[in-house]
Image: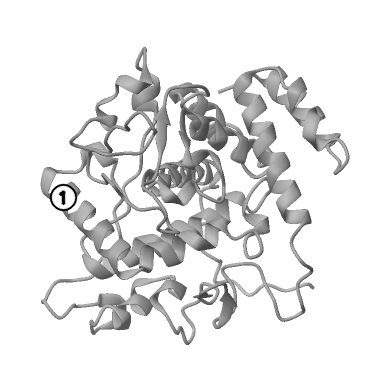
Amino acid sequence: MVEFEQLLCLVILLLSISPSNSQGICTRAPTPALRIICQQITNWDANTRNVRPTTRTSVSAPGPAGLAVGTFTVSAVASSTSPTTAYECMDIACLCGFFGGTGGSNCVLANGRTLTKALRKEYRVLTDDERQRYHTAMWTIKGNGDYDTIARIHSQFSTSPGAHSGPAFLPWHREFIKRLEIAIRRVDPTLALPYWDSTMDGALPSPADSVLWGNELMGTQDSTGAVRTGAFRNWPTVDGSRVFTRSIGTTGNLLQERDIATVVGSSDIRLLLAFTAPQAVCGLFSVAYRDMLVTTTATNDPIFFNHHSMIDLIWELWRLAQQVCGTTTFTKKQISSK
């Protein structure tokens, strides 16, 4: 993770961005990795400025059911009240009916098994059977269109301008990856969305040598960057025009355990919900760049969702660390202003 002084320098640069000077401002960034981050944020700014004004009936994704975006329809906001799709659910009771089960919060599926909460594990800690079933589920939702439908939400600036470079970054992506996890669980209810603990790779002298990029797991790329081996070999991009691309270890920084400890140990919510959250993420994107480096193509790479599952874990660890004992439930006492 970049030093505080470097981040401060970048913040000063970003505060000076305007439509007239954004093209050259990033050349003053203190490091190549921060230059990439700066360019990403200025691109987000430019694309958001170019979005046509929305009408009063338009909302940012995830939005009201029936809102048409391109060739797909955005599902409604997350709610367990009169849901129309499984993606709107916030609990097991809501999911039960969409999974063909009975019993509400004590949901029993048609095969007799109980539908439980998803338990996320590190991708490499999964058993061989769990990992294979996860790969199969991902290819299934890729084939039936669910993956691409969800992935497009991320790439559409007109429906997700608040998803990046601001305080909505973490909660927006929590809801976003939850929807992919539900799609996976509709194929195999025993699964969850694994996370990619990049500290395991960041501890290596060369992260590019990690077993993660081997033929048995996430695969390796050819001379053009196209991933031709591994569990997601020849995985088509969301628009179907080519195979997704990746390039490992060229620039940027992977998360270190000390970075996570610093974040989790801080009581300053701005460290999580201000500019630093998306910037820390972008450092990883520049390590595994190509499609992952650009917001509009980031979801072409399946590991995008595993990465954000890890970011969500860090946010949850921080939230639990700030949780004051005794405030997990509301008091039963009558609250009065008198």
Q: Is residue 317 left or right of residue 263?
A: left
Give the x, y percent position of residue 258: 48, 22
Q: Nearer the viewer, residue 129 or 93?
A: 129
Q: Nearer the viewer, residue 25 or 111?
A: 25
> What quarter of the picture does the C terminus occupy?
bottom right
Q: Quadrant of residue 179?
A: bottom left
The three-letter code of the residue at mark 1 reads Gln
Q: Nearer the viewer, residue 270 or 129?
A: 129
Question: Which residue is rendered at x = 36% and y = 47% of the image?
Answer: 243
Q: Is residue 307 left or right of residue 336?
A: left
Classed neighbour count for the residue bearing mark 1: other residues with Cα under 10 Å, few (<14), some (14–19), many (≥20): some
Give the x, y percent position of residue 321: 51, 40
Q: Mark 1: which secondary structure? A: helix
Give the x, y percent position of residue 93: 35, 78
> What quarter of the picture does the N terminus occupy?
top right
Question: Which residue is rendered at x = 44% and y = 67% of the image?
Answer: 149
In this view, 300 is above or below 145: above
Question: Which residue is rendered at x = 56% and y = 66% of the image?
Answer: 331
Q: Quadrant of residue 8?
A: top right
Residue 55 visible in the snapshot: yes
Residue hosting label 1: 132
Report the residue that reaches farthest toward the top.
Answer: 205
